[in-house]
Image (spheres, rainbow, N blue to C red):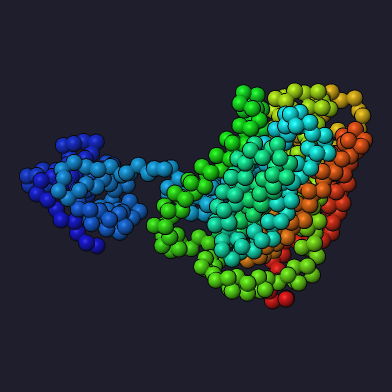
Amino acid sequence: MEKLAIKAENLFFLSHRNPSSVFDSSAGPRRLRLFPPKDRRSRVRVLCSVKETQKLKESQRVDGVVNGIPVSGSEVEFGAENRSEEAEFTWNWPPWKNLPERYKLIGTTSLAFIICNMDKVNLSVAIIPMSHQFHWSSSVAGLVQSSFFWGYALSQLPGGWVAKISGGRKVLEIGVLTWSFATALVPVLAGFMPGLILSRILVGIGEGVSPSAATDLIARSIPLEERSRAVAFVFGGLSVGSVAGLLLAPPLIQNLGWESVFYIFGLLGLGWYLGFQFLEDEKVSLTAESISRTETIYTNKTRNNSLEELGDSLKDVPWKAFFQTPAVWAMIYAHFCGSWGHYTCLSWIPTYFSEELNLNLTEAAWVSILPPLASVFVTNIAAQIADHFIANGVETTTVRKICQTIAFMSPAICMTLSSLDLGLPPWEVVGILSCGLALSSFALSGLYCTHQDMSPEYASILLGITNTVGAVPGIVGVALTGYLLDLTHSWSISLFAPSIFFYLTGTVVWLVFASSKPQSFSKRD
C-alpha cells in the first residue's frame, strides 16, 4: 500500500476524548502514538494530494482500517495538497444522482405515464362543457372520445417492433412529444370535427407506443424478482395521472375555460421531453460505469440499424409461434376484457356521476378520482404480495393467475351491485364502484407481467399484440356505450352489463390457459 507523504506541519494528527494523550510522553518529546488505548475512539484526519485522495478512497479505507491504523467509529477527511483548509465530502445533488441507472429509468418512465393519463382523462371531463357548447349528443361525444383509441390501436404493433429494434427509451421519447403536441391542438380544432378526431388519433398514436416502450425497458433492465414492483411503479403512474388530471381539470375549466386543460397538459409533456434530453446527456458519461456494473439482463441491440436490417428483423419475429401458443391467446383475450371495463369506465364515469347521481362538474370529477387514487395503493400492495410469493418459491404462473382473477372478479361483483336497484344512496354507489375499479389494478401484477415472464426478448412485441386487441374496446366499447345510452337511457345496460360479461369470461379463459413459463419462440418457429 502506497504511503502518504507526511508533511512537517501537523500533517498527521489524532484527537481523543483526552487531548493530552495524543502524544506519548514516555517515548520522548512530541512523538505520535499511532495506536491509542483500546478504550478510546479516534478520529483520523489526513491531508493529502488530490491524486493520493483517490487512491486512499479506493484502497486504504477498507473495513475501518486506514494504512493499518484501526479507525473504528472514525471519519476520514481529505484536503488539497497546497491548501491548509480541510474539505468535507461533497453533497451529492440531485438526490437521485447515485441511484442505479435502472431506477432512474423506471422513475422517468413512470413520470411519463402520469402525464400520459392526464392527457387521456382530460377529455372525459372537458367533454361535458364541450358537448354543451357544440350541442353534441351522447353518440357524438362517444365518437369523439373513442377516436383516441383508433390511433392507440394502430400504434401498438409498430411501437412494439420499433421498441425491440431501437430500444424503448427512444420510442417513449418520440411518443411523449407526439401526444403532447396533439393535445395542445385540440382547442384549435374543436370546432372542426374531422380535425378534432385527427388530433385525438395522434394523441392515441403517441400514447399507444408507450406501454410497449416501457415493457421493453423493464424486460431489458429489471430482474424477475423485482419485475412486479417495476411494472406496478411504471404502470401505476397511469392511476396517478388519472388522479392528477381529474383533480386539476375542473378548477382549470371553471376559471380558465375548457381549452386551458389541453394547453397546460400539453406543455407538461413538452417539459418532460426537454428534461429527458438533459437526463440522457448526463447519462453519457456514466455509460462505462453502468456497463461495468452489468445492470441489464441482456445487452441492448445496436441503435443504428439500416432500413434493410430493420426489415430483416421484422421477418425474424416468430409470429407463427406466437399464435400457436394458447397462453398468448389467453393474454390477448384477457387484455380485451380488462380494457373493455377500464376504457368505458374511464370515459363515461364522470358523466355517469354527473347525470345519474346528480353531481355538478367539480363534484363528478373529484368523485371520479377515487378509483384511480385507491388504485395507487392497491397497485403497490399487489406488487409486494406478488414479488414476495415468487421470491419464496411460489410458481410464477400461480401468482399471475391469482392476481388477474382478483382484477377481474372484484369489479364484476361491484358493478353488479351498482347496477341493481337496491335503493343505495349515491355515495355508497360511489364507494362500491371505487373499490371494484381499484382492485382491478391487481392486473399489473398479473396480465401485465406475463409478457416479460414468457419472453424478455419479445416482451414489447407481445404487449403490442395484446394491446392492439385491447384497444378495440376503446374504439367499439366507448362509442357503443354512448349509442346504447341514447337508445335505452339505462346506465346498467349501456355501461355495466357488457363489462360484467367480459370480466367473467376473461376470468375463465385466464385460469384455463394462462402461463408464465418462459417460451423459446424463435426455436419453435
Q: Residue at x 61, y 26 (%)?
A: 256
The picture quadrant where one finds residue 183 is top right
Percent across and percent down for residue 222 are 57, 57
Q: Nearer the viewer, residue 192 or 64?
A: 192
On screen, residue 192 above or below 297: above
Q: Residue at x 73, y 45 (%)?
A: 194
Q: Does the image show residue 355?
A: yes
How many numbered discs sit on the rendered protein?
0
Furthest-front residue in view?
192
Percent from the top left, x then y, of residue 481? 84, 41
Q: Position of residue 322 (x, y in %)?
A: 75, 68
Q: Which residue is at 62% across, 41% downward?
A: 185
> Left of 422 or right of it: where is 128?
left
Q: Quadrant of the C terminus?
A: bottom right
Q: Nearer the viewer, residue 474 or 26?
A: 474
Give left or right: position of 287 versus 399: left
Q: Quadrant of the N terminus?
A: bottom left
Residue closer to the observer: 123 or 296: 123
Q: Which image quarter: residue 511?
A: bottom right
**Image spot of residue 143 (x, y percent):** 79, 42
